């Protein structure tokens, strides 16, 4: 790392932030990103599909492996860094966003990714997650949501539905679940998306969009735990059911779905709420056109609330929101440059000693 602040150049709130990360001199393949560690997830776990998608996608970035970092917390998904042939850190329960924030802010020559689960991110780590999102640090957060605690053997999680019977809720969960996408939009996240572990093409397209985004990108990945919560997202994976349940969002396109796109999303002229209707010639002009770049988060939030927590019917997937906001690391770099320009290099000893000195008289 150079002594000067040359890696912390201001004015790069575009995809140019990726240009700060050194490129790979050799052509890369999926094999280059596979580590020599034995993958230790339960057979059939959805994590395998996500791992394969990420390993397959990484060569597209063309970045040097030595400048890519995966930071995780605690949980099944948090074993991810072991299986990536990059730098990585299996950190502290819920604290991965905080650790990644420090890393991304101080080392602009790194591409920083956070891998977390619904329990790790939304329970003990909830506070760290929302502050990373509001700050808009240049990092990417992959939130694996299987709606259960897998590593600790099947307790209900912050995303489990009301009435969920688990080892820790034998009479059914009383907690109202978090909607991670709604939470992220409410925390002013500049990029929010949702995808499914088993849809490799869609998952890869969302990862690509997240990597291109300057600032914090949160991607919720519905991931099946076939041991403790098998089939939680079956309605979104079964070909026939998914056609009627999944709403695939595409920026600039009408929000329609179902057989022959017979269903669509409209806005109530009185309440402003969104609802699903059968598309007719009379209401076709009212069908909402998806605008992922809208400055207001209102429509993105309303879209995130369409899905019923129990049945998951009318679940939007894709990029719900992608807007430009000042990037925290870039702003911090500008302050550092200004401070150095005005005051020269700082004196750490003087900073620690401070200006207020007290004499204690016995």
Image: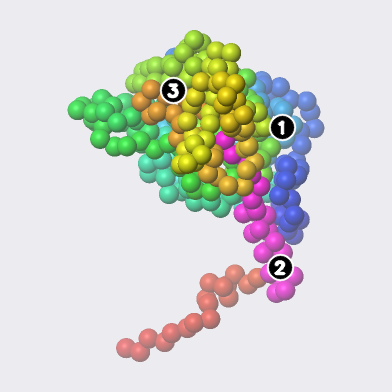
Please, is residue 124 above or below residue 26 in the view? below
Sooner in the amino-acid sequence: mark 3 or mark 1: 1
Q: Are marks 2 and 3 in contact (CB under 8 Å)?
A: no
Q: Closer to us: mark 3 or mark 1?
A: 3
| Residue 345 is one of the magenta-drawn residues | no
Please, is residue 322 above or below residue 241 in the view? below
Residue under the image location 71 percent in, 49 percent down: 13
Outermost residue, left side: 171
Q: Is residue 4 visible?
A: yes
**Label 2, on which residue?**
338
Q: Secondary structure at mark 3?
A: loop
Q: Which residues are magenta?
A: 319-344
> In the visual, does 102 lie left or right of 65?
left
Picture quarter with the C terminus: bottom left
Please, is residue 261 above or below residue 141 in the view? above
Q: Are marks 3 and 1 in contact (CB under 8 Å)?
A: no
Residue under the image location 46 percent in, 13 percent down: 241
Q: Position of residue 258 (x, y in %)?
A: 53, 16
Picture quadrant where residue 76 is located: top left
Q: What's the distance in space between the residues labelled 3 and 1, CA to CA? A: 34 Å
Sooner in the amino-acid sequence: mark 2 or mark 3: 3
Q: Nearer the viewer, residue 33 or 229?
A: 229
Can you tell which mark lies on residue 313? 3
Picture quadrant where residue 160 is located: top left
Q: Residues within 10 Å of mark 2 (few under 14, many from 20)?
A: few
Q: Nearer the viewer, residue 4 or 238?
A: 238
Q: Residues within 10 Å of mark 3 (few under 14, many from 20)?
A: some
Please, is residue 220 above or below residue 341 in the view? above
Q: What's the distance in space between the residues labelled 2 and 1, CA to CA? A: 32 Å
């Amino acid at each position: 790392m150079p002594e000067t602040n040359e890696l912390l150049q201001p004015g790069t709130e575009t995809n140019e932030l990726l240009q700060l990360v050194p490129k790979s001199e050799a052509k890369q393949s999926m094999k280059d990103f596979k580590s020599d560690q034995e993958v230790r997830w339960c057979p059939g776990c959805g994590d395998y599909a996500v791992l394969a998608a990420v390993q397959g996608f990484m060569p597209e970035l063309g970045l040097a492996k030595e400048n890519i970092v995966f930071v995780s917390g605690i949980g099944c998904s948090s074993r991810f860094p072991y299986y990536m042939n990059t730098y990585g850190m299996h950190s502290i329960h819920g604290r991965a966003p905080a650790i990644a924030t420090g890393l991304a802010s101080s080392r602009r020559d790194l591409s920083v990714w956070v891998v977390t689960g619904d329990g790790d991110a939304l329970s003990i780590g909830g506070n760290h997650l929302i502050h990373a999102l509001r700050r808009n640090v240049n990092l990417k957060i992959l939130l694996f949501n299987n709606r259960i605690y897998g590593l600790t053997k099947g307790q209900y999680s912050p995303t489990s539905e009301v009435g969920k019977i688990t080892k820790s809720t034998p009479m059914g969960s009383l907690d109202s679940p978090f909607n991670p996408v709604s939470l992220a939009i409410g925390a002013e996240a500049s990029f929010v998306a949702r995808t499914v572990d088993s849809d490799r093409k869609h998952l890869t397209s969302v990862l690509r969009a997240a990597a291109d985004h300057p600032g914090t990108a949160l991607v919720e990945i519905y991931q099946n735990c076939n041991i403790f919560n098998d089939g939680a997202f079956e309605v979104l994976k079964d070909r026939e059911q998914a056609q009627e349940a999944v709403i695939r969002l595409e920026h600039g396109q009408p929000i329609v779905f179902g057989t022959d796109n017979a269903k669509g999303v409209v806005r109530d002229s009185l309440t402003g709420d969104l609802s699903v209707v059968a598309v007719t010639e009379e209401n076709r002009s009212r069908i909402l056109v998806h605008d992922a770049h809208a400055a207001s988060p209102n429509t993105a939030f309303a879209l995130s609330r369409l899905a019923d927590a129990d049945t998951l019917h009318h679940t939007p997937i894709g990029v719900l929101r992608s807007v430009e906001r000042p990037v925290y690391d870039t702003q911090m770099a500008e302050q550092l440059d200004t401070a150095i320009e005005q005051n020269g290099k700082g004196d750490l000893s003087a900073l620690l000693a401070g200006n207020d000195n007290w004499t204690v008289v016995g």
